Amino acid sequence: MTRRHTYTAVILAAIGAMIVGLGVWITREDRADRASASSRDLPDNAASGALPSGRCAAGPLLEPGCGAWWGAYVPYAENGSLKDAVYAFEKKIGRRLDLVYNYHDMSNTERDGVLLTPDEQELGRDRMLMLAWESTVWTEPHHENWTETQLGWRDVAAGKFDRDIIDPQARRLKAYGKRVFFSFDQETDFRTPDAGTPEEFVAAYRHIHDRFARLGVDNVVWVWTVSGYLGHADLMKALYPGDAYVDWIGMDQYNYYRCQRSASWLDFESSQRPAYDWLRANISAEKPIMLSEFSTAPDPERPDRQRGWYEAIPQVAPDLPGVRALVHWNRPVPGENCDLTVNKGPALEGYRKAGEAPYFNQPLPTR
């Protein structure tokens, strides 16, 4: 090679190195910008302040040392705000909720598919959050008319949604820092066979649990939620992911009465005791239980009956000692005589009175 050729080769090599270096720098800057933008989208860390101490302080899995948490699911306000709906509900019942329960799909959209929305973050400053995550994509905002597309447990378990759906939400929960209750596909016994088999549910549940752990999400308290309908006893057993994957057990039992054309009015204890006893005998005698949805339909012939139903809760709850959280379902369901809310009248009076009980007023964890 001549000296000129050698010189030219050296120059070209230097220029090439500069281009490569520039490309690396641009790539790094681009990645940094994307990471910065992504970080701005993450929730603020809500884990702050000293933890309550003493006999009644909550344990590491948010189990209260005394009594039980008092919570509710409250549908979004007409203006689309969850916080406005919760604040209005709290004004009616005369107290702040310990726990706000909200539902999400896996659409990964800001509307319903992002865990820890700005409203949830604000409400979570002074309350605990319970997030139910469904392996569906809802047809209408906030599951308005209960229509959806099921994604399928088999695909969840296979990791099909890890990168685009599960991992981003896991990172958001981790960034939030404060402990949250979390339920995957609540009332799972009513999701078969559309979503898959019991074995596929267990695999999907464990996959999400393990994926969160792999990403360092250690502030999630895992709630396995079934209906508690004893006609599904064998099915519920088959759907249990195992003690290592479950922190709390959730059950959804109601006094539907005329809403489901039942001839029998069930008082609060009669509506909850059978499922509670079955779960204690067949699933776990030790794990805390959450009444993750409960309510009573009205008696159209005896409107005052709802007041007594709610007023009895503080007397009954201590006799269900495993129940450490009660979450009212404050939304009507389709059908005649199916207003399950406590927004007015005797139902509100009874619920408001029950919420004053010391048993349901315990020190809240701050992180």
Image: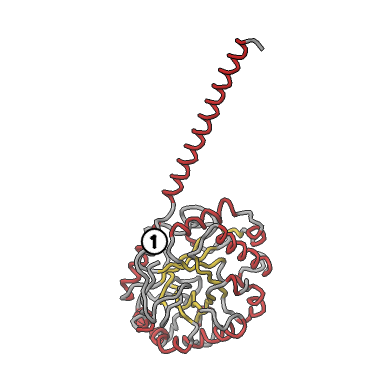
Give the residue at x 48% y 64%.
Answer: 219
Q: Is residue 237 above or below residue 175?
A: below
Q: Nearer the viewer, residue 298 or 114?
A: 114
Q: How many marks?
A: 1
Q: Is residue 51 above or below residue 231?
A: above
Q: Nearer the viewer, residue 68 or 243?
A: 243
Q: Quadrant of residue 20?
A: top right
Residue 301 point in image, percent of width and height: 43, 86
Q: Nearer the viewer, residue 29 or 247?
A: 29
Tell me, yes or no, if residue 138 can be seen here. Answer: no
Mark 1 Cα-neighbour bin, 10 Å: few <14, some 14–19, many ≥20 = some
The residue labelled by disc 1 is 46
Tell me, yes or no, if residue 158 can be seen here. Answer: yes
Q: Is residue 312 above or below residue 75?
A: below
Residue 78 point in image, percent of width and height: 38, 61
Which image quarter holds the N terminus? top right
- Disc 1 on helix, strand or loop? loop
Q: Indicate the colouring scheme.
A: secondary structure
Give the residue at x 62% y 71%.
Answer: 241
Q: Nearer the viewer, residue 16 or 114?
A: 16
Q: Residue furthest front?
A: 3
Give the residue at x 42% y 64%.
Answer: 178
Instruction: Tell me: 190 left or right of 92.
Output: right
Give the residue at x 62% y 58%.
Answer: 151
Q: Quadrant of residue 5?
A: top right
Instruction: Tell me: 212 left or right of 2.
Output: left
Amino acid type indicated by mark 1: Ala
Residue 333 point in image, percent of width and height: 49, 71
Which image quarter holds the C terminus? bottom left
Residue 86 point in image, percent of width and height: 37, 67
